[in-house]
């Protein structure tokens, strides 16, 4: 039962992540990460630490008119009582404030989550790009698909 | 274990909701709601009661050639043994019977579900619109994104 | 608890299915099926047996530059301790190696999964097509939507 309850809590972490992102709530979003988190959304944009992540998130509100993040196919492998590796699939639509067409992103998340103070948080979080259309980030981290 | 079983049953309620919608089965769809349900898909279209909802659903078959509802990011907060508030994310594609382009909808559901006769049902159900493309409903309920 | 654990394992089977498909890992993908599986992605393409499925999967790598499969709305009905019928919804984007536009597929999976050697696998797996755009398979199995 513990593993099942933890599984639900980790799925909820991903749901809250998408929610705070789409609601443009950078404080609540950053609070889902550990203080020493390592985060990367694209090559050359590695972020270390919740404070640095928090600053980066400030741009969301002015850059996008709206975003919608749809997370599915969540696969969780526990690596101890308080640690798990998570793989998930993302479909996201980004509407820009200027007149560009919507940016569509098809990707994967690869994350390590840890339990701190009875709360699951992201310790490591990386977005991989399967493909995209009209997206402002031209080169994402590859998923490593076989040729 | 009870909470976990109820969580599964509530997720199943959302899966069945999408299924009956996409299969154009208005009777089975309406049966997922309480008799005194409150439902709103857009401003000015509030519906009260399962019978009124049932009548509204009659138009689905003739208006759409096909719909596909993809529900993810389901977050459930119990408000007692037989009641829960649910937040979920929707991506839906609507193909119209006329030659319009497909209507794409990115939204959120905000629902209150209750257990009646050992069956979870929608008591309150509201669709919020994050953004849309070529959708026949021009103005949806806002999600309340921060500026 | 057993049913809940099995439910998680079956959801994981679908997540792994999508993962190996998108990563172009036909061996790992075929290993998710029983030796005597029955699989059909479109009318006239019925496959019987894991070996025949495995051969068909060889084309994925050369035909697609990328695919992204998003599976949600998973509904599981157990038909015994070691068997379950599963309904799920699929949104998939296919990027072709030539210059065609991306193929978008909105569909449903109807599957029967069985437990063999403590591992859940697909015994029967069928893709139904709700609608599609620019997809290379023009006629899919219908979902059976009411008129």
Image (spheres, coloured by chain):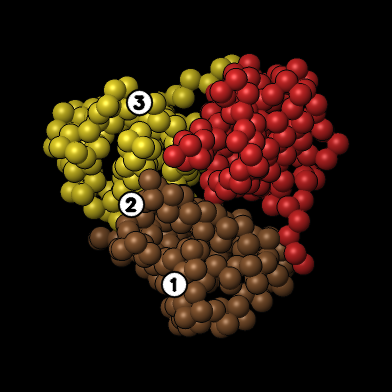
Chain colours: A red, B yellow, C brown
Instruction: Tell if the residue under mark 1 belongs to the same chain as the one under mark 3.
Output: no
Q: Return the x and y of residue C52 as percentages of the image width and height.
A: 56, 83
User: Foreground: A37 or A26?
Assistant: A37
Going by the image, does B101 lie left or right of B49? Answer: right
In the displayed structure, B116 sits above or below C52; it is above
Q: On residue B78, which mark appears?
A: 3
Dot 2: few (<14), some (14–19), or many (≥20) neighbours within 10 Å?
many
Q: Nearer the viewer, mark 3 or mark 2?
A: 3
Snapshot quadrant of residue A102: top right
Residue B141 in percent (x, y) is at 40, 26
Closer to us: mark 2 or mark 1? Answer: 1
Residue nearest the viewer, comparing A59 with A73: A73
Whether label 3 touches label 2, CB < 8 Å: no
**Residue C56 visible somewhere in the drawing:** no
Q: Position of residue A114 (x, y in %)?
A: 65, 31
- Relative image position of residue C89 (x, y in whole percent): 43, 55
Q: CA distance from mark 2 to mark 1?
A: 23 Å
From the image, tell me which residue sits under label 1: C123
* Vertical arrangement, residue B20 with respect to residue B110, above or below: below
**B96 up-or-down from A101: above or below:** below
Within 10 Å of disc 1 (Cα), the crowding (few <14, some 14-19, many 20+) is: many
Looking at the rendering, which quadrant does residue B50 occupy? Answer: top left
């Amino acid at each position: 039962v513990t593993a099942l309850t933890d599984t639900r809590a980790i799925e909820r972490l991903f749901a809250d992540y998408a929610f705070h992102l789409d609601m443009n709530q950078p404080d609540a979003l950053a609070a889902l990460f550990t203080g020493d988190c390592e985060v990367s959304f694209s090559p050359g944009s590695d972020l270390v630490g919740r404070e640095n992540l928090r600053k980066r998130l400030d741009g969301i509100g002015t850059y996008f008119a709206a975003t919608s993040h749809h997370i599915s196919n969540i696969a969780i492998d526990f690596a101890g009582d308080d640690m798990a590796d998570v793989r998930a699939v993302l479909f996201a639509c980004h509407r820009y404030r200027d007149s560009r067409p919507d940016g569509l992103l098809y990707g994967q998340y690869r994350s390590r989550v840890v339990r701190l103070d009875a709360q699951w948080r992201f310790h490591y979080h990386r977005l991989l790009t399967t493909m995209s259309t009209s997206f402002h980030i031209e080169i994402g981290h590859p998923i490593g698909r076989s040729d």
